[in-house]
Amino acid sequence: MRRTKILVLVVAAALLLAASVPLLAQDSLTVLCTPQEDWCVAMTQAFQEETGISTNYVRLSSGESLARIRASQDNPEFSVWWGGPADAFIAGAEEGLLDVYMSENAEDIPEAYKDVDGSWTGVYVGALGFCSNLEILEELGVEAPTSWEALLAPELQGFVAMAHPATSGTAFTAFWTIVTLKADEFEAAEEGTGYDEEGAPTEAAVDAAFEYFAALNQNILQYTRSGSAPGTMAGQGEIAVAVIFSHDCVKLQEEGFEGILVNTFPEEGTGYEIGGMGIIKNGPEPEAARLWYDWALTAAAQEIGATVNSLQLPTNPDAAVSDLSVNLADVNTVEYNFSAAGTSRTAIVERFDAEIATAPTQ
């Protein structure tokens, strides 16, 4: 009888220990974070304070994030990926790198800003634009650009910068914007030549976009790894025009470059990003990742960005919007096909690296 009691106690203790392991494993969370550093810090600190989960992050640009997840898929380093244009998440989902998670909080997010199958959900939105140094433009005798064609002006040779689409979601958004505009041009000139039967831009539109970027390359001083880095270059007078998201230009204006930088948009139309979020397949902290996912979709969490001048538009309709944020209704945005962009991403960045410019290594 005594041996039976001992055996029962041993089994119970073993079961208790087994049950406690997942709980202990969820005492920490590692986030792969794509937006600017101070927003990554603010988000992880707020989540840690609210949940008690020790939360760390690694900040990488969008293209780097996708490459890092791809490279470590057999032994994932991160549990949740937060921020960066949705086309990278679509590419990752197609490669089987992301888990499906249908968060109840995702019900509050408009359908246009999330994947219907639950592989990613949008947490912010922002429009692409031009961030220009007024003094340098004056020296060059050039007005602040209000069209994509204006970037090709010979006066701007060596005075334009953008990130590389292999490393940056910002730059890939710029490339896909031109693809879309070329598809629209072909469609208007000759019906059926711009888009295929599924509504994706044709190869002819992609080829035309490469022709544009080959011309623009003549004016590019530098391709950076990070999408926002050219804005700082413009603020410091190293270049005249940066191709970046408009909210990054506003952030720079608020943090020391007011009166120096001006934000403009291309009149032909510009692309926009849906900043995505996904749970990394087989990540080490799945329960903590789901807690983050639920939390990051709340209005309170989405309002944190404005506290560090990250002025993207929140996707939660209940979240307060800063007066400094760009109103998308005032911007001519293209019909950006996120699904087609995501499925085309790998081939395009490889071709850009081969035909236009190699990706920066540092």
Image (spheres, rainbow, N blue to C red):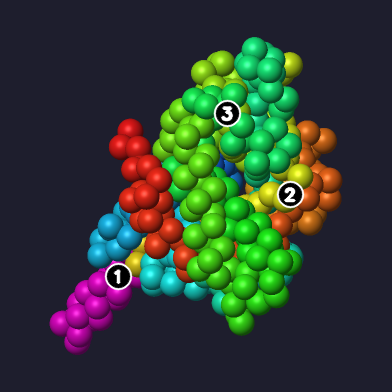
In what element is the residue under mark 2? loop
Question: Where is residue 94, by image quadrant?
Answer: bottom left
- Residue type, label 2: Glu
Q: Residue at x 62, y 59 (%)?
A: 182
Give the side of residue 52 with respect to residue 155, left or right. left
**Rendering coords of residue 45 (x, y %):** 53, 38
Distance CA(mark 2)–CA(mark 3): 20 Å
- Which numbered mark, 2 or 1, is in the foreground of this view? 2
The segment highlighted magenta reads 1-26
Q: Position of residue 354 (x, y in %)?
A: 33, 51
Mark 1 lies on a secondary structure that is helix
The Cα–Cα distance between marks 3 and 1, rounded to whole angstroms, is: 68 Å
Residue 193 lies, with reference to residue 166, above or below; the image says below
> Residue placed at 73% from the left, 25% from the top?
143
Label pair 2/3, CB-CB below 8 angstroms: no
Residue placed under numbered mark 1 in the picture:
18
State which quarter of the image contains the N terminus: bottom left
Quickly name the residue at label 2.
Answer: 268
Q: Which disc is residue 154 wearing? A: 3
